[in-house]
Amino acid sequence: MRICSFLPSATEIVYDLGLKDSLYGVTHECDYPPEARDKPHVVHSVFEGQEPTSGEISRVIAERLAQGLGIYEIDSELLNAARPDLLITQAVCEV
């Protein structure tokens, strides 16, 4: 099985289940266990490389959600290369 985790807590569970070798992609926020940082990052924040204020974050997120866009960006090239059988994710809460 080939797994991609879009959620840090799910990444931890995958490791706890002993399935680390089945994990082919994680998010930019997956930092535990430490070796999860070495997995390909198939999900990135729209704010990557920036330091926005809380007001800017709120505004951008509200705008993106109103446009039907997510607050994270998926690296489709990396995701396609991972060829996952299972994606672990969750719905985004309302702002």
Image (cartoon, rainbow, N blue to C red):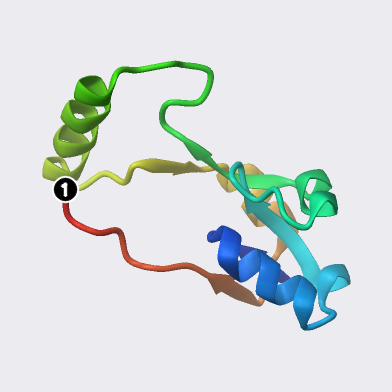
Residue 77 lies left or right of residue 56; in this view the side is right
Q: In this rendering, does residue 16 appear at all?
A: yes
Tag count in the figure? 1
Quarter-wise, where is residue 21 in the image?
A: bottom right
Quarter-wise, where is residue 53 in the image?
A: top left
Work out whether 53 lies above or below 86.
above
Identify the image quadrant of the N terminus: bottom right
Work out whether 17 lies above or below 28.
below
At x 83%, y 69%, the residue is 20
Disc 1: CA contacts within 10 A as few (<14), some (14-19) or many (>=20): few
Rendering coords of residue 3 (x, y %) = 69, 71
Rendering coords of residue 40 (x, y %) = 74, 46
Task: Write down the residue under mark 1.
Answer: 95
Q: Say which element carries label 1.
A: loop
Residue 52 lies left or right of residue 65; in this view the side is right
Quarter-wise, where is residue 88 in the image?
A: bottom right
Rendering coords of residue 66 (x, y %) = 11, 42
At x 23%, y 36%, the residue is 61
At x 35%, y 17%, the residue is 52
Q: In this rendering, does residue 1 appear at all?
A: no
Q: Which residue type does callout 1 highlight? A: Val
Q: Residue furthest left?
A: 66
Rendering coords of residue 72 (x, y %) = 42, 43
